[in-house]
Amino acid sequence: MMKAVLLLAALCGAMPVAAQDLQSQEIIVTGSRVEQDDYQRDMPAVGLRRTADFLVQEVVIRGDTRDPKQRAVEIRQMLARAIALAERHGVQLAYGDYILTPLTAANLDDVTLSNDNRPDSQKVVFLVKAPLGGAESGTTAEKRIETYVDAVPEVGRAQMDVSGDPSLSIVGPDKYRLQIADAVMIDARALAERMGAGYAVTIEGLNMPVLWTRAGPSAVMLYIPYKLVIVPRP
């Protein structure tokens, strides 16, 4: 079942990222509003709701072989098998807490081997992504990931399991800036007409960075933390 994550996971704060980087980078979306560059605003009423690009699931490979060198070899070999099988199952692998980096055979050693919560046990943590959109709903994407995780063969005492609830990601959120601004201006014009000829509505904050939040099992809301100000006409 889909559970709230907008991963839509447990990221409540984010490291600052230059706006131009968000034209193409893939970003994890949290269940609560992301705060960028220390901006803190209430989410406005108008934004852009769209299907997220990927459902994202954290996965852990654990190993508890007594010999530490053999344990590390088994975990790394299972990770290599996971990478080799990803495309066949229609999923992609990545790592990162905020901006996601594709995980491939060329960079698998970049995923850190860390101590687990038991003696003589270690783990690697990474992400499995299934695309959303079209016929791929959150439910089918989650099932695709579960099938993939079950299909990766164990190596020695190494085992792979999902960890926590699935999340969502969005690729290049800042490329939607103009669409968001258009929606804000349409709303502002409608409000100005209702206020009557004696008042005008001004918009503040459209220079702020694009932010995002989860808006449903597989949807995100992209928005700019703008503010509408009603002023009397001179």
Image: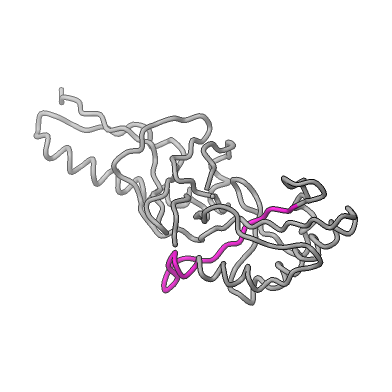
> Is 229 on the left-hand or right-hand side of 87?
left
Nearest the viewer among 53 and 61 is 61
Q: Is 156 within the magenta? A: no
Residue 146, percent across and down? 56, 68
* Extreme-bottom residue of the structure: 88
Residue 82, percent across and down? 71, 67
Rendering quarter of residue 207: top left
> Is 80 on the left-hand or right-hand side of 34?
right
Residue 154, placed above or below residue 234: below
**Residues shaded magenta:** 123-141
Nearest the viewer among 32 and 72 is 72
Residue 193, percent across and down? 13, 40
Quadrant where the N terminus is found in the figure: bottom left
Total marks placed? 0
Q: Is 124 within the magenta? A: yes
Residue 40, placed above or below residue 160: above
Residue at the (44%, 64%) spot, across then down? 138
Nearest the viewer among 19 and 73 is 73
Rendering quarter of residue 101: bottom right
Residue 119, percent across and down? 80, 46
Is any atom of residue 169 visible in this view?
no
Is any atom of residue 128 visible in this view?
yes
Residue 151, placed above or below residue 233: below
Residue at the (71%, 67%) spot, across then down? 83
Residue 129, placed above or below residue 12: below
> Is 41 on the left-hand or right-hand side of 161?
left
> Is 85 on the left-hand or right-hand side of 48?
right
Nearest the viewer among 78 and 222 is 78
Residue at the (42%, 74%) spot, across then down? 135
Quadrant where the C terminus is found in the figure: top left
Q: Tell me the colour scheme of the image.
A: one colour
